[in-house]
Image: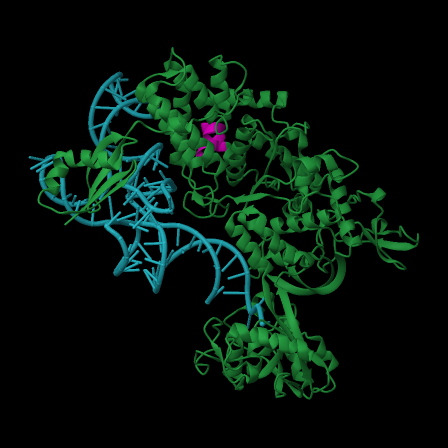
Chain colours: A green, B cyan
Amino acid sequence: MNYDFKTTEKKWQDKWEETGVFHASTDYTMPKFYCLVEFPYPSGQGLHVGHPRSYTALDIVARKKRLQGYNVLYPMGWDAFGLPTENFAIKNHIHPEIVTKNNIAHFTQQLKSLGFSFDWSREVNTTDPEYFKWTQWIFIQLFKKGLAYKTEMPVNWCTSCKCVLANEEVVGGVCERCGSEVVRKVKSQWMLKITEYAERLINDLDDLDYIERVKIQQKNWIGRSTGAEVDFTATTGDTLTVYTTRPDTLFGATYMVMSPEHPLIEKWADKLENIDAIKAYRDEAARKSDFERTEVNKDKTGVRLQGVSAINPVNGTEIPIFISDYVLVSYGTGAIMAVPGHDTRDWEFAKKFELPIIEVVKGGDVEKEAFTDCATGVMVNSGFLTGMSVEDAKKAITEWLQKENKGHSKVNYKLRDWVFSRQRYWGEPIPIVKCEKCGYVPLPESELPLRLPMVESYEPTENGESPLAPLTDWVNTTCPVCGGKATRETDTMPQWAGSSWYFLRYCDPHNSDALASEEALNYWLPVDWYNGGMEHTTLHLLYSRFWHKFLYDIGAVPTREPYAKRTSHGMILGENGEKMSKSRGNVVNPDDIVNEYGADTMRLYEMFIGDFEKAAPWNSASIKGCKRFVDRFWALQDIVCDGEGYTPALESAFHKTIKKVTQDIDSLKANTAIAAMMSLLNGIYEQGRVTADELKTLTILLNPFAPHVTEELWSVMNFGGTVTEQSWPEYDEEKCKEDTVEIAVQINGKIRQRINVAADISQQDALALVKADEKIAAELEGKTVIKELYVKGKLVNIVVK
RNA sequence: GCCGGUGUGAUGGAAUUGGCAGACGUGCCGGACUCAAAAUCCGGUGGUAGCGAUACCGUGCGGGUUCGAAUCCCGCCACCGGCACCA
């Protein structure tokens, strides 16, 4: 009988929905396992074949954990605010709410057709007011603790989205989402003080089970460096403070550079003889886009300040000051001491402006290039530091600065505060009003959720205002504190807001008194296993760790960290090895695969495609192998024989396969788990029959991967109940071993023969057997044996001369 | 430039405390079934030489360590990802 996947898969999906068999239990005495995948943005394009790669992998984990007796939470929801929906809505004159609803319906149907064991009773949606009520609540708590503040500052402005972007959203100088040019624009913006958590965000990584590349990428992004702040005195009497990671080179500082935007420039305006040239340079720098300004290989430019110079605190030398756009206002103090002998950028600048270069660390040739090696150099021309190693000199000079009150050690981070406002409609309204008397005032919690007003037009404005700004009826309000005139904040939150805490809501999704009950959070947190894309490492993953730590600090959640374990899947590429995209015409639609081959085959194929962590090209031809596997498994029912337990020929194979599949699921190697089951299946067909017990074992093993065909087989075989009610099979370590093994026989490391021996044979016996072999005996004839090696169960190597 | 990763048959990929390279799948070749095709089943399939047993070569390139290297070390090359004037 052929396997009819179409009706069978639908039948079981309906049954799972009806019985709610995958709903997580609220029996908090059971051992728990919280298994999480990144919830999708329900785009108009529907599901991508990349989505099921992650969802299937953790579905396998979730299903196996349930069979092992855990209370498993494997939820799904929608990260539904965002620009594509808004843009589609604008173009087609449909409200974003409707667009979102339709997209979610489509996604839901697609996900259900793949048979994932999500707990649909806990579905969350970031655009649901009952959900974003709590997103707004968290924002208010941040505001109350001084971690949300509004400030005027230069921000990244996407010229196409007409909206500001967080630093994390600017990739290679262009907008992460649309690829358009990003320019600098001064705007008043809500900011979140993620920098306050920089140290903890780095340090706490140590105790987490994240794959190494995620940790490294987050650390690099946060960018901690240790150095010193040094106070130089300007000839105006002002203190000009710089940050440096090389305080040891202080004697080699021959000039200073301030960023063009440095505030002291304004202060010194009347003392600067060339103020016009300075202002012209600053204006030019301001006009440049981020991309132009940070282009690395461009020539150094700058202007020397005429009329003001600085005194090097360590030796009293008067040195010139420049402004140049290679110094950033937003990092350190916005000014540097330049040591051209030992910094590549300073060296280039010094060569161009013909400034003196002093060697203070021996080991290179500072006339040819900057010598930047810290490990081997010895201090020279450096007063009391001369003769020290770089490391010792750093300590000595920092102590000296501290003692002389001219500086101190200092840690800096590349991480910047998070720009949190967006000038768009389809996002959470920021629940703050501006009162003429009281300033910024949060809405009382009783007024949450603050809903989006219904509007006719939500097009972005050219002047950079939010589409909500013209709605005077909504904007004008009264101050919750004094009752006076006030206006609402019209910017909305970025898409990353709702996704920063959604995993908390799954624990208790219908709670109207709190983001989730204490009891539920105590039980479910932390997430035991979280899988998602590498592209979120410095965005969602970092943001949500920040929010979680904040919530921990105010006692709203019981754990310091949200996710105990983080893994990441590789991308599925198009058949031509390029990234899948409409414009490349290489997009594979998961619906087509499910229709043609069925969900089980699709799931197996996506897991079998290769190493889960690596990118893999789609290959239509290879799917057949998985389809054959499903059909051959189904056909096992035709060769079921009498008898119990495992047949002797296959007993060890079964134990080994159970072991392999069990371990491989836990280490995210579904590809080799499937290969092992294919091998076992081949072994069964070679034997020509299978016992009911054997079939039961294989069915349970395969169930997490191919849930439909396994349930159907279980049912037609009348094995009783359903597979989901069974227990995960156990293996016996002893029985994984074969009685006899084939070992390789090497002479001088080259294989000359293979022989069968008892698995537990001693070295002595093995060697005796080997030497009795005709071929080996002939090889050894007339040679001197120097060494004999035996690796148990693997090989014998005889070294001869 | 800095950080991380990858490189294995025709092809996707297996194999890591150093121990039989190429598991499993695809494709291809041959056979069975069929009027025929598809599907299915059986056998073969790294390269070179040979009828053959077998021999030699073989994991990006060049060295090294070792009885033994895809795996470890040194030096390169290519590709992918991230960061990038962060002092």
**Residue A198 at x, y = what percent?**
64, 58
State the extent of the magenta-drawn residues as a range: A592-605
Q: State whether residue A278 is above or below residue A503.
A: below
Q: Position of residue A653 (x, y in %)?
A: 36, 26
Q: What type of secondary structure mainly makes up the magenta span? A: helix
**Would you say residue A707 is visible in this rendering?**
yes
Residue A137, position as x, y percentages in the image: 77, 46
In the rendered image, the vertical position of residue A293 relative to residue A415, given as above or below? below
Residue A593 lies in the magenta-colored region: yes
- In this rendering, position of residue A263 left or right of residue A343: right
Instruction: Give how far across and how far down residue A335 sits, in percent.
Output: 64, 75
Q: Nearer the viewer, residue A772 or A43?
A: A772
**Picture quarter with the N terminus of chain A:** top left
Is residue A375 found left or right of A443 in the rendered image? Answer: left
Residue occupying the far right of the picture: A483
Q: Is residue A258 visible?
A: no
Q: Is residue A39 magenta?
A: no
Seen from the viewer's position, the closer of residues A502 and B75 is B75
A411 vs A427, left or right, is left
- Please say if A729 is above or below B63: above
Q: Is residue A254 above or below residue A719?
A: below
Image point 47% across, 76% down: which residue?
A377
